[in-house]
Image: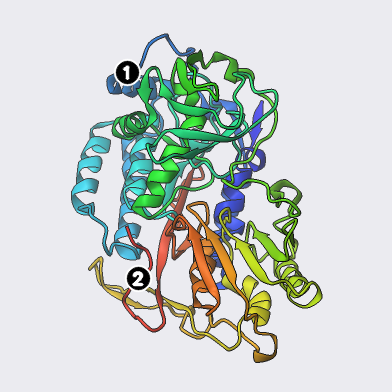
Amino acid sequence: MSINMSKIANIFLSVLLFNSFVCAQNNAAETGQYNSILKRNIKKSEIFSGLYAAKKSGHYSTKDWRLIIDNYWGKGLPSAEKLKIFDSAVERINKSYAAFQNLQINFDSLTAFYRSEVENGVSRGRFAAIMNHMSFALKEAHTVIADIPVNFGTEILPGVPLFVIGPWQDNSRFGASLTPLPDSSLLVYRALPSHKLGLTRGDIILGYDGIPWKKLYKNLLNAELPIHPNGVWASSDKSLTHCLLASAGLNWHLYDTIDVVKTTNDTLHLSTIPLSRQKGFIWGNEQLPVAGVPFPDFYDKDFVTWGIVTGSNIGYIYVASWNPDAEYKISAQFYNAVDSLMNIFETDGLILDFRNNDGGWMGVAHAGYSLLFQKYTPSVAFDIRSSVPDHYSMIPHPTYNKTIFTIPGLSSTYYNKPIAVLTGPGAISNGDFESWRMKLHPMSRLFGKSSCGAFATAITPTLNNEDWFFYLTYGNAYPVNSPGEYLVQF
């Protein structure tokens, strides 16, 4: 039996490979290698140690999880091979990671601690967790190190020690999509009609096993379970907290009961076992339907939709990706949406909804911007690390200079009516950039939570082992009028 990685990693591929801001010619060789790694088939014997047992009743401690992690995936590579992978990753991070500014960790101390543990011998699962959490500590959505069979190829059964992070993609395992409330409980904003626990829109998830999720996710981070990225995590502190909270439903496999406040105000403590039989497809986008405007559909490659809000003359455009792949025709679709709402329907205002956008390339937006903007408007440029070992020494990116991302504008088509731009933590990478760049339009205002904060570009270095994936933040953006004021903030 084999597991097809193109199915297992479908969402992750779309977010990190094709739709990431890194898609650029000068990174083509490393990106191509990443593509070939993730598309290979992984035999089931490569993934499972054969020691899996269904979750035992009771709340697991950090010690319990560590033992399960060690047993589940087995010993893995010899310690010498693990050290080669570890040292290679650390060396490349020290040389190239471009977002050490404002990062409140001592990376040298962190890596020394982890290296000592690896040197003394760790299981495959623990080594995967070390690499996951070392990259997670850098707190930039473009930086991920993962053991592909462990982190992406493992079937997430009850009791399997994987921490799922990322609420903005496929939520089908839980059958409902969640968003945080001010008290850190989670609102069900969408649920499948056949939900196995009877969840409905308006229900509130408190946590599991009688413990609030806002405490449980911190316990999981402390226990350092290997991470399964459901899409990507966030960069800024606020957006990352939002991301971790909203991931609550996707981690039901780690607990016995889920605590739910129903719309009737009854508090129920329901077994999680029925969720193993949950079927149907549901997406996490933190958006509610708008009358007159269809949602985008990722699986049908329908990333741009638009319409006029029923009962108004307000145009509404969803953009769920800025993928530059010609197959998706996003540039033409966005231009057509803007042109139609400006020049055919002559709307009184526009709403641009970027709250769920998995990134891509800035140039994809430029055709539509040429209608919206009155003049050519400089936006951002990038710096990369210099060759010296100083983590904070930066030099200009060889390609991404202050002119390449200038927003085009034509005075004859300037949209001089109100533009509301809706943003949120699910706007990632170029979802971040377009949320930020629309602030440069004189008639625009931003509404909602801050975007992900991943104002960066990335490369995919090799770790010389086909099981390992490495995605590394390589460039940090800044406004062209404020060199050194980097947009990746924590």
- Say which residue appears at 27% left-offset and 57% top-offset: 103
Task: Specify the farthest residue to the top.
Answer: 57
- Say which residue appears at 52% left-offset and 80% top-offset: 442
Q: Residue at label 1? A: 64
Q: What x and y, as percent, mark residue 82?
A: 35, 40
Instruction: Using residue 310 as the reference point, say whether residue 487 is left or right of it.
Output: left
User: Does the rendering let one see residue 30?
Assistant: no
User: Does the rendering let one see residue 267?
Assistant: yes
Q: How far apart in space, not on screen, are marks 2 and 1 (Cα)?
A: 41 Å
Q: Secondary structure at mark 1?
A: helix
- Label 2: how many residues lie within 10 Å, few (<14), some (14-19) or many (20+)? many
Instruction: Using residue 41 as the reference point, say whether residue 80 is left or right of it.
Output: left
Marks 1 and 2: in contact by CB < 8 Å? no
Q: What x and y, as percent, mark residue 233?
A: 45, 47
Task: Specify the farthest residue to the front.
Answer: 311
- Quarter residue 418 falls in: bottom right
- Label 1: how many residues lie within 10 Å, few (<14), some (14-19) or many (20+)? few
Please state which amino acid type lies under the numbered disc 1: Asp
Label drawn at residue 486: 2
Which circle's residue, 2 or 1, is located before the other in the chain? 1
- Say which residue appears at 33% left-offset and 35% top-offset: 221
Q: Is residue 180 above or below residue 391?
A: above
Mark whose residue sits in front, 2 or 1: 2
- Quarter residue 198 falls in: top right
Instruction: Using residue 471 as the reference point, say whether residue 419 is left or right of it.
Output: right
